Amino acid sequence: MGSVLALSSGPGHRNWPFSTDPPPSRWDAHPAYWDSPPRWERRDGRLPNPGSFHSLHRSCKDVFPQQIEGVKMILNKTLSSFFKVSHTLHLSAVSPSYYRFHVEHLQSDDDGKDKDAPALIGEMDSSGSLNAHALLHVTERVRARTVFQTQQSQFVTWQFETEYRGNDFTAAVTVANPDVLRESVILVAHFLQSVSSGLVLGGELVYHRGRAEEGGILTLAGQYSGPNWTATLNAGKGGAHASYYHRANKQIQVGVEFEASTRTQETTTSFGYQMELPEANMVFRGMINSRCIIGGVLEKRLTPLPATLVMGAFVNHRGDKLQVGLGVHVG
């Protein structure tokens, strides 16, 4: 979440390879318990909770490879059952090199006594930029989130989110960058309703007010899920975002995305797949899109060592560019 624009789930927010936007930080990822399991796993006959609005396209996006360029080393260290730290060193010839320190304080057990304790996530890089993220279960149904982000010595983002999860619906309200002196604020409201065991309908309303401008964007969303596939569509004034995810078997998953933006007047269609080879301790993710970009990332678990080797390459045939990356994850 590099800016408040990331609050909107409209199209055009994906960091494609060869993009001038920096890759998203890992600090913005939610803990595993923050989102409910897939809806088709519910077998009690009742309508399930649809989960969070921001996770509608997550199944499809997880299939695509993450951009990798240069040399990166990540060292993860678990200090206790609820305290983890990591060190990241990235050397690049395209973007500025950096060092990043990441720390997490999470609940030790989802079913333990510390379940209501806050989850704290912090990250600082060598330029002095800081990201702070706090998650709290206020009650069994109410969850709160706070995010602060600085770019060197300047505050960039400060937002507060409250989410309520009913038996078959989810409602959330986010307040971002409130400034009394400048009379500006961004409000985001989300709502999802389970219509049937596989169908979810909802929407997002983004309202922005400043001294010189005021406006809002309404986006409608729908998702239909089967036992091994999910189709999702977001459409509004800002554009459209459609995705389809399909799990062919235990080893192969595929995904297709379509994004159209009315602001940039651009459309992009992408195809991605993930292949798991448990016998070889390998996972391969590949993608190709309508911008003539082809790429793939291979992850190899170096057993018995607690390390993972990551190799990736992306080719932009239209721009005649090549990016190659090598990484090692330890811990």
Image (cartoon, helix red, strand yellow):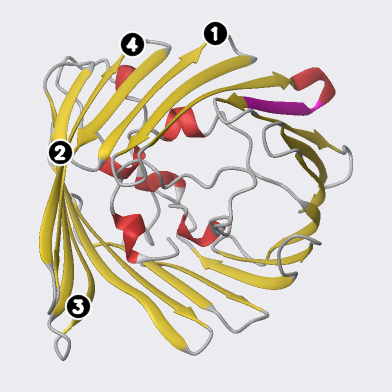
Q: CA distance from mark 3 to mark 4?
A: 41 Å
* Crowd rating for badge 3 (residues with CA inside 10 Å; few <14, some 14–19, many 20+): some
Question: Could you say which disc has been placed on residue 236 in the image?
Answer: none
Q: Which residue is mark 3?
A: 178
Q: Which residue is mark 1?
A: 248
Give, as a three-letter code, the residue at label 1.
Answer: Ala
| Image quadrant assignment for residue 6 | bottom left
The label nearer to you, 2 versus 1, is: 2
Q: Is residue 207 above or below residue 176?
A: above
Residue 304 visible in image: yes
The percent position of residue 80, horizontal first and vertical second, equals: 62, 65
Q: CA distance from mark 2 to mark 1?
A: 30 Å
Q: Which residue is mark 2?
A: 203
Left or right relative to 231: residue 326:
right
The label nearer to you, 1 versus 3, is: 3
Q: Is residue 245 above or below residue 234?
A: above
Q: Which residues are magenta?
A: 281-287
Q: Is residue 297 magenta?
A: no
Residue drawn at the location 47% of the way across and 20% of the way down: 256
Q: Pick whichever of labels 1 and 3 is earlier in the sequence.
A: 3
- Rendered-image quadrant of the C terminus: bottom right
